[in-house]
């Protein structure tokens, strides 16, 4: 029996697919070279924007034709769409998925695939290591807290053991993954599972101490294994502590390209997005990191055309990009997502041609060296 996995979306989904592959391998399946030669096809879905969702529907539609020719073919859908469906207590979302995709045999929550088997790694050089899953931040545009649920951190020692093994196996790079990677361990600490010799690290935010994270400790422990490179995505500005900056500065094998999503360069829009910083605070953080870590570069995520974004507010984003001089920006046009606060209470009122124009303009401005 052969399996084929198609992955949509982010690195976290790729890491999940590596674990799905391992669970098939453990049951004696082999990897198929294509959809056509597979007995089971797994589609690992993404919902971050409507376009990503539509690509899944398009693929399933094509696969249903394949299934007509080969009725024994099993199609399994997993990932963010299914995560959302199982978290929707009304059950309506799951019914909707079943109706839209009648060719699908099983909707499998990704949570059912544990960490018991060694992932079948797709890259021989860089190993993906999920350290936490889910998000508690509820940025108003973002569907992740609904698809992946609240943040759950993997046990500290489990991650360390995995990295130690990776070093022995000859991997030269590791990429630590989490939706809010630098808040790693907040749930462990509050549940009392903290590591005795490690003080939780807080960031003071808006006059109060933010979450107790363990990320600087974890990053240091992983860096000490001596990998050529230790990278991590995605960080949030509000959990970027001084301790974390110190660890990055101390270990030259920790990445010098930091991914620090800013989302917008306008304070009103940031507030509307429920991002907990002002542009001045973001710039101050960037300055502090640049001072402590020579040769550091920044990449970012930006959304253009968010609800109510005026020309002036968009210009403020251009201005901030010029100030930071990002090495690369992943720019997206705002896309309304189910269950989010923005969908519930704000108007998606920036016309598509305006979103597109802003997207093209910013892409040309920021990513000029990349093309
Ligand atoms: N519309 C457009 N872009 C989005 N992102 C998240 N949600 C949306 C949305 N509804 C972008 C953000 C995030 C990245 C992973 O995807 O920039 O950082
Ligand atoms: Fe989404 Fe915000 Fe969480 Fe990132 S921090 S996953 S943008 S809710």
Image (spheres, rainbow, N blue to C red):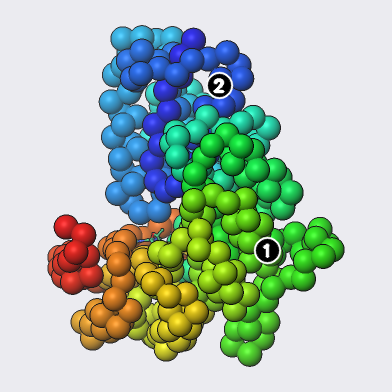
In the rendered view, would you say 36 is above or below 18?
Answer: above
To which residue does mark 1 refer? 217
Which one is in front, 325 or 203?
A: 325
**What is the secondary structure assignment of the residue under circle 2?**
helix
Mark 1 or 2, nearer chain start: 2
Whether residue 301 is visible, yes or no, is yes
Residue 246: quadrant of the picture: bottom right
**Apparent side of residue 149 relative to residue 175 in the rendered image (left or right):** right
Residue 207: quadrant of the picture: bottom right
Image point (59%, 87%), residue name: 206
In the rendered view, would you say 359 is above or below 265?
Answer: above
Q: CA distance from mark 1 to mark 2?
A: 34 Å
* Residue 258 x/y as whole percent: 43, 66
Label 1 with label 2: CB-CB less than 8 Å: no
Q: On the rendering, which quadrant does ligand 1 occupy? A: bottom left
Residue 256's label in the rendered image is none
| Quadrant location, the C terminus | bottom left
* Residue 313 x/y as whole percent: 28, 83
User: Crowdedness of circle 1 by 10 Å Cα count: few (<14), some, many (20+)?
Assistant: many
* Residue 289 x/y as whole percent: 47, 78
User: Crowdedness of circle 2 by 10 Å Cα count: few (<14), some, many (20+)?
Assistant: some
The number of numbered badges drawn on the structure is: 2
Q: Nearer the viewer, mark 1 or mark 2?
A: 1
Which one is in front, 164 or 8?
A: 164
Image point (36%, 13%), residue name: 37
* Residue 348 x/y as whole percent: 31, 68
To which residue does mark 2 refer? 24
Which one is in front, 346 or 279?
A: 279
**Apparent side of residue 179 relative to residue 243 in the rendered image (left or right):** left
Image point (58%, 51%), residue name: 226
**Apparent side of residue 32 relative to residue 108 in the rendered image (left or right):** left
């Amino acid at each position: 029996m052969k399996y084929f996995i198609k992955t949509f979306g982010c690195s976290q989904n790729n890491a999940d697919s590596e674990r799905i592959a391992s669970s098939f391998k453990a049951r004696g399946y082999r990897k198929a070279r294509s959809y056509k030669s597979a007995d089971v096809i797994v589609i690992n879905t993404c919902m971050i924007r409507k376009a990503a969702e539509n690509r899944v529907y398009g693929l399933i539609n094509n696969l249903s034709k394949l299934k007509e020719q080969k009725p024994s073919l099993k199609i399994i859908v997993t990932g963010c769409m299914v995560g959302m469906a199982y978290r929707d207590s009304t059950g309506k979302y799951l019914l909707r998925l079943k109706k839209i995709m009648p060719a699908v045999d099983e909707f499998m929550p990704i949570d059912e695939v544990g960490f018991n088997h060694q992932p079948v790694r797709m890259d021989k050089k860089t190993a993906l290591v999920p350290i936490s899953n889910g998000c508690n931040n509820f940025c108003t545009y973002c569907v992740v807290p609904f698809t992946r649920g609240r943040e759950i951190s993997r046990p500290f020692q489990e991650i360390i053991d995995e990295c130690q093994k990776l070093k022995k196996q000859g991997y030269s790079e590791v990429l630590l993954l989490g939706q809010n990677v630098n808040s790693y361990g907040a749930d462990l600490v509050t549940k009392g599972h903290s590591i005795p010799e490690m003080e939780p690290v807080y960031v003071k935010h808006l006059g109060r101490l933010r979450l107790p994270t363990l990320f600087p400790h974890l990053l240091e422990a992983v860096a000490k294994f001596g990998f050529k490179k230790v990278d991590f995505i995605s960080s949030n500005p509000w959990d970027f502590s001084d301790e974390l900056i110190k660890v990055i500065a101390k270990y030259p094998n920790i990445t010098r390209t930091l991914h620090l999503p800013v989302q917008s360069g306008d304070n009103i829009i940031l507030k509307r997005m429920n991002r907990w910083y002002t542009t001045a605070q973001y710039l101050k953080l960037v300055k502090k990191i640049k001072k402590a870590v020579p040769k550091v570069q920044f990449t970012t995520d930006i959304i253009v055309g968010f609800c109510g974004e005026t020309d002036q507010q968009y210009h403020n984003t251009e201005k901030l990009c010029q100030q930071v001089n990002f090495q690369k920006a992943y720019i997206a046009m705002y896309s309304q997502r189910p269950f989010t606060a923005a969908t519930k209470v704000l108007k998606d009122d920036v016309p598509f041609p305006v979103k597109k124009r802003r997207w093209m303009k910013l892409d040309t401005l920021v990513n000029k060296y990349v093309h």
